[in-house]
Amino acid sequence: MTKRFEHDVVLSGIGKSAVGRRLDRDPLALVRDAAEVALADAGLTMADIDGLSTAPGPLPGPPMGYTVGGIEVLTELLGVRPTWFAASPETMGHAGPIIDGALAVSAGLCRHVLSIRATWEGTHRRLLAEGELPAPGGGRVTGRAQWHSPFGAMSPANWIAMQATNHMATYGTTKEQLGALALNARANAARNPDAIYRDPLTMDDYLGARLVSTPFGLYDCDVPCDGAVAVIISSVDTIADLRAPVRLDAVGTAMTERFSWDQGTMEHEPMVAGPAEHLWTRTDLTPADVDVAQLYDGFTFNCLSWLEALGFCEVGDGGPFVEGGDRIALDGELPLNTSGGQLSEGRLHGFGLVHEAVVQLRGDGDERQVPGSPEVCVVSTGGGHPGGALLLTTLA
């Protein structure tokens, strides 16, 4: 198709609540804070919002801090009666609600979509440990867990660690090369007043950290936290009314692999190859045009997988590409995860990366601003969970 829905929309506003390991605040208060900041940023009011999207929406069983509910909760909290809405755990990674919102605006169902992602994992874990929340129930293990649980593989830390181990064995990737991603994230977080972990991190610190799941140590893993991020997707026709819109040039949504975590090629994290390849078919831009990248780093290897899949280096060459950290530093050829990413800023489930992309393209990064007025930013979210990618730009 010659028409691309992406060009019908802009990202018009971003907002973030306070972010912390355990804020001990009602998560809906964080949602409200993020929404109000995003509206003010766009120069809009709640009355302008006629679309709502979120993920994952209501989940069966105990919430585990991954969600604050779905559209029903948001409409009551915000007083919005949308003409279009969507909430689903099965979507294009954590960017799915933004892509859904862009499609709805392009189709003419609404003009301004408020898309929100919130998490309260830190406080939830404390309340669970203290008996203030019901513990997950027992019963027979079903779904994908029935294939993992008998082997003690209870977490994505175990599943992705297997893929990282295979990458090391196949391509010679080293622990120190993964460490370069963690050290780069921490160096950027030190310049971000909103980041959770800002203290200096050395390679000795990284290598000496407690083991989580071979080859991952503590600093290979992202930071569970409390926080909310809101993004407003608006019709391109409303640009004259907006403060500083950023254009959506292309999205990547394709699924080319099995959904399974452990039945694919094992050379990369699953569900990254399809969205990455698809993204470049929907734009005239190429990886060489990208000025800054915000790539999902639930674990260091996630980020390495996205670098390879998006074509910044060949498959298997991700380790040498990031080695030493010079190429991915703030003043390098591909500044990476400039807010500190999920490894140091906090696990905001991909929306934090979208927020940072807009900050960078607007030139609002202060001490962590990429030099040279970046014009193109690629964002990836998810992987393992179906992944998604966005290409954002200030170019007309």
Image (tube, rainbow, N blue to C red):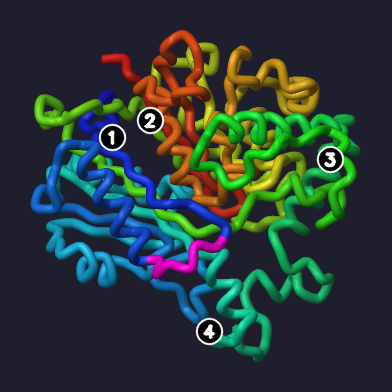
Q: Amino acid at mark 1?
A: Leu
> Main SS of the magenta segment?
loop
Q: Amino acid at mark 4?
A: Leu
Marks 4 and 1, how far apart in space? 37 Å
Q: In the visual, does 262 lie left or right of 231?
A: right
Q: Can residue 24 be found in the magenta stretch?
A: yes
Q: In the visual, does 316 lie left or right of 371?
A: right
- Sequence-earlier tag: 2 or 4: 4
Q: Which residues are magenta?
A: 22-27
Q: Residues within 10 Å of mark 4 (few under 14, many from 20)?
A: some
Marks 1 and 3, how far apart in space? 38 Å
Q: In this rendering, which labeled residue sits more in front, label 4 or label 3?
A: 3
Name the quadrant containing residue 308: top right
Is 357 situated above or below 394? below
Instruction: Tell me, yes or no, whether the two marked residues, 2 and 1, touch with CB atoms within 8 Å.
Output: yes
Q: Amino acid at mark 3?
A: Asp
Q: Nearer the viewer, residue 197 or 328?
A: 197
Residue 373 in view (yes/no): yes
Instruction: Tell me, yes or no, whether the two marked residues, 2 and 4, touch with CB atoms within 8 Å.
Output: no
Residue 369: x, y in percent?
A: 48, 21
Residue 24: x, y in percent?
A: 48, 68
Mark 3 — residue? 205
Mark 1 — residue? 11
Mark 4 — residue? 133
